[in-house]
Structures are given as C-alpha cells and as structure tokens.
Image: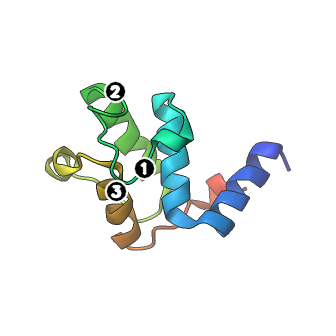
Amino acid sequence: MTIHTLTQRAITTCGGVATEVRNLIADRLGVAADRVSDEAHFADDLGADWLDRLELMIAIEDQFTGVEIADDVADQMLAVGDLIRFVESADHGRPHARAAR
C-alpha cells in the first residue's frame, strides 16, 4: 500500500466527499487547499479557465461512482460549493474502488 493510497483512504473516511472534492480541486488547479472554500468561484477566485473546469469535471466523474456531469449542468456550477453539493447528491457519491486501493 502506498502513501497516496493511505491518504486517499484517510480523506474518504475522515473528511467525506466535501474534503475529497476540495483536495481534488486544489490538486487539479494547482492552488493551496485553504483557498478552496465553498464560496470560492472557479474562474474569479481559483483562476480556472474553461479547459481547467472541463478537466476537473472529468476528474470528478472518474473519482466518484454514479456522478455524471452534463455540460449544461457544469456550466451552472460557478463555485466550489455548487460542485460539492452536486457530488453529494449523486447516486453514490463514493470513490471508485480503484481510487481507494
């Protein structure tokens, strides 16, 4: 078991979906995790352009079972909290088995 695997399990177990989504956003956008608040806007606060947002949505779909984000829905998600609420309300909102290994 690698350190990355242990970290992923700790995030999933201790922090839940919201923490995992925030950490994924910070990692993908190359920003400090403390900047990724529910109120943080992807473009204005985190500097994400359309391609960054597209790649982020794909990463979210890859990470969480049952999460599929349509383009029109993704366009409406302007802040981190919007994305977290969407993932939490999706079918399972749990990481794929391969992410937790």
**Where, by quadrant of the figure, is residue 97 drawn?**
bottom right
For the residue pair 79 and 63, the one nearer the viewer reads as: 79
Residue at the spot 49% in from the left edge and 61% down from the top edge: 18
Q: Which residue is mark 2?
A: 47
Q: Amino acid at mark 1?
A: Ser
Residue 5 left/right relative to 30: right
- Position of 81 with respect to 6 (left or right) is left
Element carrying mark 1 = loop
- Which badge, 1 or 2, comes first in the chain's sequence? 1
Q: Kindly state the secondary structure of the residue where label 3 is placed.
A: helix
Q: Is residue 49 above or below residue 55?
A: above
Q: Residues within 10 Å of mark 3 (few under 14, many from 20)?
A: some
| 71 lies above or below 92 | above
- Distance between the alpha carbons at the discs numbered 1 and 2: 14 Å
Q: Earlier in the sequence, mark 3 or mark 1?
A: 1
Q: Which mark is residue 37?
A: 1
Instruction: Give the residue type that dot 2 points to.
Output: Gly
Q: Residue 93's x, y, as percent?
A: 46, 68
Q: CA distance from mark 3 to mark 2?
A: 16 Å
Residue in view at x 34 percent, y 27 percent: 47
- Name the residue nearer the viewer: 100 or 18: 18
In the displayed structure image, the side of residue 76 where residue 61 appears, left or right: right
Question: Is residue 63 shown to the viewer in this render?
Answer: no
Mark 3 vs 1: CB contact within 8 A: yes
| 31 displayed left or right of 47 | right
- Name of the residue lying farthest toward the right: 1
